[in-house]
Image (cartoon, helix red, strand yellow):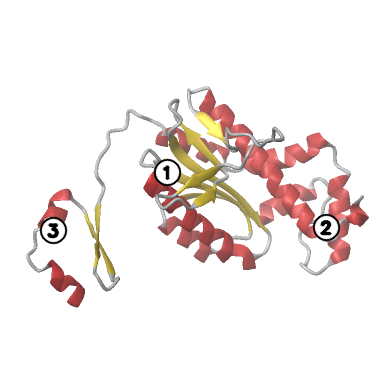
């Protein structure tokens, strides 16, 4: 019953996010598996009760990260990391965005077969959070909050309410709860429809093995015995080798 929900706004947000994630997973499964790849959103290993475990991937230090999904090749080598996140309030931007920026690069440093990271983000994401994620080479597909509000309005659901307005949030949850399973699924599908064409183009281009590999840049990290870390980027291998052959590398830390 809707009256039994202590936080109807949070419950509705979770339902919207889950619906979007399911629609996204269904779309990507159909896209990649008919081309010989695998789409995994759960671990192949099952719990004792028969349910599937979370999809955990590890960094090179053994730290586990619960990744939303991964696209793997026929040898089950991970190729693309996928995140699907919905947030309503901007106050959650830093927490959710920082997690992606921590988890994805850490996992990618261990699994050298990974070619790309993709985040499908819905809701109120700030430009600073998006810029932060892009700086970590995360490919972002954004479904704006207003688009979600307009979509839910077609089903008679007012989704643009204040965080503390329990009357409005309860009314929205009751409206959503009254929808049929097909209608609820359609909301997620319509959310994903907004980005699926561009998403398909990117995924297929990443998986294209005919693309000739080229080294775009070389990064060198220098670590001192005092714990200092200095990183240098070079456009070519030759420039990097020339730098490493410098007799005064020790002076780099001093200067």
The residue under label 2 is 8
Q: Do callouts 1 and 3 mark residues in contact (Cβ within 8 Å)?
A: no
Q: Do callouts 2 and 3 mark residues in contact (Cβ within 8 Å)?
A: no
Q: Earlier in the sequence, mark 1 or mark 3?
A: 1
The residue under label 3 is 244
Element assignment for label 1:
strand
Residue 14 x %, y %: 73, 51
Q: CA distance from mark 1 to mark 3?
A: 29 Å
Residue drawn at the location 67% of the way across and 43% of the way down: 20
Comparing marks 1 and 3, which lies closer to the viewer?
Answer: 3
Q: Earlier in the sequence, mark 2 or mark 1?
A: 2
Of the 4 image quadrants, the one containing the C terminus is bottom left
Q: CA distance from mark 2 to mark 3?
A: 59 Å
Q: Earlier in the sequence, mark 2 or mark 3?
A: 2
Q: CA distance from mark 2 to mark 1?
A: 36 Å
Q: Is residue 216 above or below residue 245?
A: above
109 sits to left or right of 156: left
Comparing marks 2 and 3, which lies closer to the viewer?
Answer: 3
**Farthest residue toward the front?**
48
Q: Is residue 166 above or below residue 44?
A: below
228 sits to left or right of 183: left
Residue 93 x %, y %: 59, 63
Element assignment for label 2:
helix
Residue 210 x %, y %: 32, 28
244 sits to left or right of 3: left
Q: Is residue 45 above or below residue 63?
A: above
Classify mark 2: residues with Cα within 10 Å, few (<14), some (14-19) or many (20+): many
Considering depth in this image, is 180 or 95 the residue closer to the camera? 95
Residue drawn at the location 79% of the way across and 50% of the way down: 153
Q: Which mark is residue 116?
A: 1
When asked about the image quadrant of residue 215, the answer is top left
Element assignment for label 3:
helix
């Amino acid at each position: 019953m809707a009256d039994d929900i202590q936080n109807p706004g949070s419950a509705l947000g979770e339902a919207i996010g889950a619906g979007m994630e399911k629609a996204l997973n269904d779309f990507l499964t159909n896209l990649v598996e008919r081309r010989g790849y695998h789409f995994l959103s759960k671990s192949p290993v099952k719990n004792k009760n028969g349910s599937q475990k979370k999809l955990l991937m590890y960094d090179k230090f053994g730290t586990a990260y619960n990744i939303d999904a991964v696209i793997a090749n026929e040898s089950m080598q991970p190729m693309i990391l996928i995140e699907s996140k919905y947030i309503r309030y901007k106050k959650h931007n830093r927490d959710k965005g920082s997690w992606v920026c921590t988890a994805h690069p850490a996992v990618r440093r261990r699994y050298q077969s990974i070619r790309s990271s993709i985040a499908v983000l819905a809701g109120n994401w700030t430009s600073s959070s998006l810029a932060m994620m892009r700086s970590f080479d995360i490919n972002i597909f954004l479904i704006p909050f207003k688009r979600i509000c307009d979509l839910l309005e077609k089903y008679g659901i007012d989704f643009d309410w204040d965080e503390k307005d329990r009357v409005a949030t309860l009314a929205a949850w009751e409206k959503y709860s009254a929808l049929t399973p097909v209608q609820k699924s359609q909301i997620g599908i319509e959310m994903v429809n907004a980005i699926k064409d561009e998403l398909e183009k990117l995924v297929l281009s990443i998986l294209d093995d005919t693309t000739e590999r080229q080294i775009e840049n070389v990064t060198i990290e220098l670590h001192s015995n005092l714990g200092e870390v200095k990183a240098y980027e070079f456009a070519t291998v030759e420039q990097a080798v020339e730098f490493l052959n410098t007799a005064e590398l020790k002076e780099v830390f001093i200067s």
